[in-house]
Image (cartoon, grey):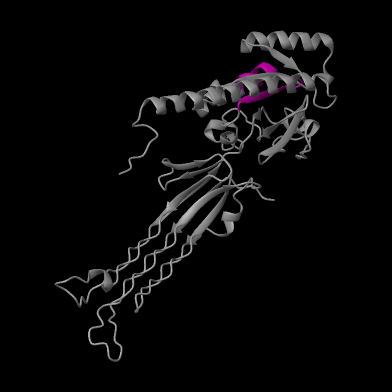
Amino acid sequence: MKFLDLCKVYIRSGGGGAGCVSFRREKFIEYGGPNGGDGGNGGSVIAVAVDGLNTLIDFRYQQHFFAQSGQHGMGQGMTGKTGEDIILRLPVGTEIIDEDEETVIADLTEVGQEVVLARGGNGGWGNLHFKSATNQAPRRANPGQEGVERTIWLRLKLIADAGLLGMPNAGKSTFLAATSNARPKIADYPFTTLVPNLGVVGVDNVEFVVADIPGLIEGASEGRGLGDMFLGHVERCNVLLHLVDGTSGDPMQDCRTIVEELEAYGGDLADKPRITVLNKIDALDAEERAFLKDEMEASTGGPVMLMSGVSGEGVTDVLRALRAEIDEGRLRARVSAAAGTEENADDPAEGTSWQP
């Protein structure tokens, strides 16, 4: 399946049907009066987050979505048929952005979450609505309300608990393949991974989702290599797993390069909890391991773990460290959500809607 995480879509809701001007004319009925029906409402364009999708590839082949217009009103007081809605089924984690590419209309982060992107126009009133004691034979009806036409952008940010970062050939895909059922492409040349991959990883009977994105190089924020176009897929992660190739010429410089690119990307990505791991230690002896670990801890100012995705050495310890950070991240999210709920409860103007 091809991967697509950004696309442009054109949508239009249906217009409302026009009201009808009609009079009741039957034999032996002298004063029939008006009986024009109302027009039907137009269909709306609705976006819904569904399970089982992880790409926007369906919107590469169809970019225009037009809802059905409402039917016109008819005689004998018959209301026109309401137009059918158009449902855009999107993967969980999709951001809906306005045409200016800056204003976020909605962020679909849960299955079943939906938002109306373009509401259908109301149907017009028929002449039956304008009957009064002083105007018993009205010859006017309202036209239907026009539909809404707009252009939107869909941007997918994968939902994962942990994100893999590193230079090309740092062993990210090997780690994902060794710890999950995912089968990413693995080879001995840079940029083997061209699109993000997801894998479900388990440790101590607990499962979590890990996202592997293409490797970063120096100047990725300026568009070098594959650039930072895939960093958005790890923005929602609770923890980042930074893999450093222990067999490269300068592991410390590789580590600093990734940190600098995260800071250049902006947002809170550089402030997320990050676990630094020296990978490919199966190719290093004990003295080289100790030396590189001490140097990297002095450079990063934090602990550095040792691992080999090929031999499996240290993998379980890394997974347990990831699980601990993920649990803390989920706890922080629950506390933040609870605090927001309490604030809305204390302030009656927040989180409530006015009702007559």
Question: Which quadrant of the figure contains the C terminus?
Answer: top left
**Residue furthest bottom in the image:** 27
| Along the line of sight, the residue nearer the viewer: 274 or 134 | 134
| Along the line of sight, the residue nearer the viewer: 161 or 241 | 161
Q: Looking at the image, can residue 350 be seen?
A: yes
The count of marks equals 0
Examine the rendered structure and indicate whether residue 254 appears above or below residue 111. above
Q: Does residue 61 show up magenta in the picture?
A: no
| Along the line of sight, the residue nearer the viewer: 48 or 23 | 23
* Residue name at image x 31 percent, y 71 percent: 19
Q: Does residue 248 show up magenta in the picture?
A: yes
Examine the rendered structure and indicate whether residue 144 appears above or below residue 220. below
* Residue name at image x 44 percent, y 58 percent: 44
**Residue 258, quarter of picture:** top right
Q: Position of residue 159 (x, y in %)?
A: 61, 36
Q: Looking at the image, can residue 280 be seen?
A: no
Examine the rendered structure and indicate whether residue 229 appears above or below residue 255. below
> Magenta residues?
238-257
**Residue 123, quarter of picture:** bottom left
Q: Position of residue 27 (x, y in %)?
A: 30, 91
**Residue furthest left in the image:** 134
Q: Position of residue 343 (x, y in %)?
A: 41, 25
Examine the rendered structure and indicate whether residue 235 appears above or below residue 151. above
Q: Is residue 353 left or right of residue 66?
A: left
* Residue name at image x 80 percent, y 19 percent: 314
**Residue furthest front in the image:** 28
Q: Position of residue 21 (x, y in %)?
A: 28, 77
**Residue 329, quarter of picture:** top right
| Along the line of sight, the residue nearer the viewer: 147 or 257 | 147
